[in-house]
Amino acid sequence: MGKIRVGVVGVGRGGMMMSYCEKEQHAKLVAICDKWAEGLELKKNELNDPDISYYTDFDEFLKQDMDVVMLANYAHQHAPFAIKAMRAGFHVISEVLPCLTMKEAVELIETIEQTGKTYCYAENYCYMPGPYEMRRLYKAGVIGELDYCEGEYVHNCEDGWTSLTYGDPKHWRNLMHSTFYCTHSLGPLVHISGQRPVRVSGFEFLFNDANVRMGRKCRGGLEMVTFEGGATGKSIHGDLQRNNISYIIYGTKGRLETARECTQMGDVSKIYVEYNEVEGDYSTCKREVYDPKADKWEVAKQFGHGGSDYYCIWNALEKIAGNPDADAIDVYEAMDMHLPGMFAHRSILAGGIPMDIPDLRDPAERDKWRNDTTCVIPEVAGDMLVPAYSKGDIPIPDEVFERRQREWQQHHTQR
Ligand SMILES: NC(=O)c1ccc[n+]([C@@H]2O[C@H](COP(=O)([O-])OP(=O)(O)OC[C@H]3O[C@@H](n4cnc5c(N)ncnc54)[C@H](O)[C@@H]3O)[C@@H](O)[C@H]2O)c1
């Protein structure tokens, strides 16, 4: 295969995918789509490349001659866009999250199976240096079998909320339930251990003044998960008043752990390794602290999220190119990362009781869910609409959005 011809949807986060294509030899950017005409024009001027085609309409974009569609459109609309793109003959790399409802999850999986197209889920946090090295060590059996784990992705977005939501009360970041954006914290735990979460209890952050100031229904939450081997884990994500990223895996022989980003001791680029070479024999204990660096670090470090953006897209494109060593995240693993958040929300609405997480690898299981549109978006949910917050919608004054819209009008070229 020659250069992989790439079309990108969404000029915000999609900008990272565009820079990737500029820097890496195996990909070539051929088209960009965004319904925001002004943003598209800004991108056109910035790139100044006559070989790139620009579209404001997704259906027109799908007529472009290309190989891969990279989706960086709204996070709750990825599945319908991915399905359309694959039906039009393209491979797909999807930003987080993979789908909004169980109906979409089933349709997405079956479209991939029917079309034979490659779908890669771009959960970049799995590829950060720390968690990626933890995966290598776990697979090598260094700490034995999974016993307990934790993932934390806490990102205080209040200061940048206007550029993220443009003061739109209907923006997905304002509307979604607390446990929607769960794969930055839970995803690496799944990718490291290779285990499927089978049961979840959900908890949501308090609705407080920060919700009102930002104009959002939910700021985040947590999932207490049971994995298929019986181990338990905690995933916490969303907006609290400070930031942190960190991961811990306890096994039957020891522990792997990243530094906590917030301590400024090397963040998730540093790992702490402690294990008994012989299980149960503490005289064989080994300890190491180091900064793992994968191949191509000099290139990768120029990209965001600790270089993970680079490795994530590189592996996805190599998978599409047929490289058997590419470590891409397929749709089944994407659901292992995402469905715990969806069912944590159901758990929260039911008072915190545990929920079984379906395994959609099993075609028989899909039939139970293929008409399930349960979600917080009225146009998608129909008569299965549920509230984002367990105590119902707490009103946010119009003035909050009006103020953010005014701010956006003044500074919007920053998007
Ligand atoms: N993995 C990460 O670290 C990371 C970081 C930031 C954002 N993201 C993801 O990237 C995606 C985009 O986020 P964002 O921050 O750029 O903000 P966003 O969700 O506001 O931007 C989406 C863009 O898609 C465009 N769009 C929406 N519907 C469209 C349609 N029908 N046709 C054409 N264009 C359409 C919008 O105009 C907008 O420019 C989200 O899915 C988000 O979850 C991931």
Image: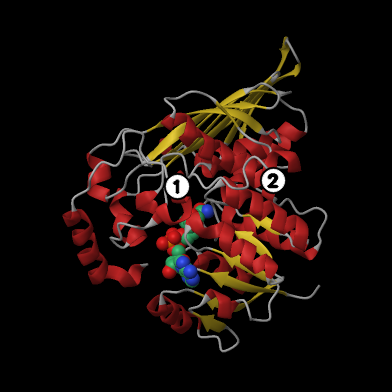
Q: Nearer the viewer, residue 54 or 157?
A: 54
Is residue 295 left or right of 171 when viewed as pictured? right
Q: Amino acid at mark 1?
A: Asp
Which residue occupies 50% across, 68% down? Answer: 15
Question: Any mark on residue 258, and which?
Answer: none
At a point 50% along the width and 31% down the height, the residue shown is: 223
Does residue 301 appear in this view?
A: no
Element assignment for label 1: helix
Instruction: Measuring from the top left, give residue 392's x and y in whole percent.
Output: 31, 38
Three-letter residue code for mark 2: Tyr
What residue sits 72% from the left and 23% below the top? 145
Crowdedness near tag 1: few (<14), some (14–19) or many (≥20) residues, C-alpha within 10 Å: few
- The relative height of residue 386 versus residue 166 in the rendered view (above or below) is above
| SS for callout 2 | helix
Tell me the colour scheme of the image: secondary structure
Quarter of the image with the C terminus in it: bottom left
**How far is disc 2 from disc 1 in space, using C-alphas?**
28 Å
Residue where numbered disc 2 is placed: 332
Query: Can you tell which mark lies on residue 383?
Result: 1
Residue 357 sits above or below residue 93 on the image:
above
Tally the marks. Answer: 2
Hey, which quadrant is residue 71 in on the image? bottom right
